Image (tube, rainbow, N blue to C red):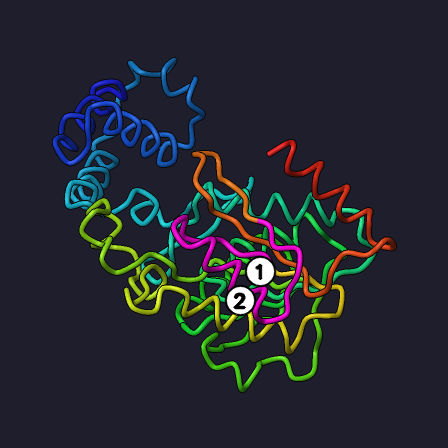
Amino acid sequence: MTIREYTRHITDTLQPLYDVHEAAAVAKAYLQARLHLPAHELVLRGNDTLPSPLIGQFNDELLLLQQGTPLQYVLGEAEFYGLTFKVSPDVLIPRPETEELVNLIVRQHRHSPTLRIWDVGTGSGCIAIALAKHLPQAEMFATDISEAALSIARANAKANQVAITFAQHDMLDTAHLPFGDTHFDILVSNPPYIPAALRSTMHPNVVAHEPHSALFVPDDQPLLFYEALALIGTKCLNPQGSLFAETFEGYHEELERLFLSQGYNDFQSLEDINGKKRIIFVFLQPINDERLWIRDERQSILDNL
C-alpha cells in the first residue's frame, strides 16, 4: 500500500467520527508525524510503498483514532508555541488559544531585566516551559495538583532544556502556598473553567479522553479557581505584579467584579483568534505615571493581537 493509498484509508476509516476534511487533516498529520515527513514531501512521496511492519503498527494506532482517541494522545506528543511536548491522558492537550496567553506575556515582558513567574496548574508544563524558553531572564516556578501531570511536565522541561522549580499543590488550598515567602512578578494560569452543564455540547473526543479535573467546574461555582487565584495573588504578587489567566468567555463581567473586589486594578479582557473573550490580565496596583510604559506596551500588544 502506498502513502497516498494509506492516507485515503485513514480518511475513510475516520468517517463519520469526523467530517471528510477533518478526517483528511488527521490522516495527513498522523502520517507526517509517523514518517517524519513535512507536508510537501508527504505529497511528493505519495507513490512510495509502506513497509508491511509499518502498516501493522499504523493499523493498531488507527484503531485508537477510530475509537475517538485524540491524535496527540496517539502520537504521545503535541506542538505548542514552536516546541514539542509529551502528552498523555493525564494532561490537557495544549491549544492555540493558550499560545495567545503565552504570547501576550512574552511580548509584554521581553525587555524586563528580571522576572519571577509562577504557572499555577501547569499540566503538561506548556505555559511555563514556553515562557522559560522565550523569557530566559525569568526564574520559573510551576505547580499542579496531579503528580502524574508533574511527571510529564518535568520530562517536558528536561526535553526542552529549561530550568523550572516544580511543586505539587492544590490551587484551592490558598492557606498553604508551596514556595513559602517567595514573591512573584507574574502569576499565570489556565485553570478549569468550563461549566459542567456544557459537557454534552463538547466534542466526544475531548469529553471521553481529556482529564475532566482540568476542564470542568461546578455549575454553581463557575469562578471557583479564579477566586483562589485572586487570593493567591494578594498573598504572593509583588506590589507591581500582574496576573494573567485563560478564561471562559461567559464570565468576564463577573471576573472583573471579582478581581476588583479583591483589590486588583486595571482589569483587561481580551478576545482570542476566534473573537471569544478568552484572556484576562490584571495589575495588583493601579498604573501610575512611573509605569506608563506598561500601558503603552499593553496597548501595542492589544493592537497587534
Mark 2 surroundings within 10 Å by alpha-carbon count, few (fewer than 14), some (14 through 19), many (20 or more): many
Residue type beneath disc 2: Val
Tag 2 near tag 1, CB within 8 Å: yes
Residue nearest the viewer, comparing 267 with 106? 267
Camera-nearest residue between 94 and 232: 232
Counting labels gives 2
Q: Quadrant of residue 179?
A: bottom right
Give the quadrant of residue 19.
top left
Give the x, y percent position of residue 18.
19, 32
Q: Residue furthest bottom?
A: 175
Residue situated furthest right in the rendering: 290
Is residue 256 magenta-colored?
yes
The relative height of residue 195 versus residue 228 in the rendered view (above or below) is above
Q: Is residue 193 above or below residue 68?
A: below
Q: Residues within 10 Å of mark 1 (few under 14, many from 20)?
A: many
Q: Is residue 70 left or right of residue 272?
A: left
Q: What residue is rendered at 58% in x and 58% in y?
A: 128
Q: Is residue 27 above or below residue 265?
A: above
The residue lying at 56 percent from left, 65 percent from top is 259
Residue 260 painted magenta? yes
Q: Earlier in the sequence, mark 2 or mark 1?
A: 2
Q: Secondary structure at mark 1?
A: strand
Is 21 left, or right, of 228 in this rendering?
left
Q: CA distance from mark 2 to mark 1?
A: 6 Å
Residue at the spot 71% in from the left edge and 64% down from the top edge: 241
Residue carrying label 1: 188
Q: Compare residues 144 and 152 and report the one nearer the observer.
A: 144
- Residue highlighted by disc 2: 120
Q: Position of residue 213 (x, y in %)?
A: 32, 66
Stretch of the chain drawn in magenta = 244-268
Q: Which residue is at the front of the view, 245 or 141?
A: 245
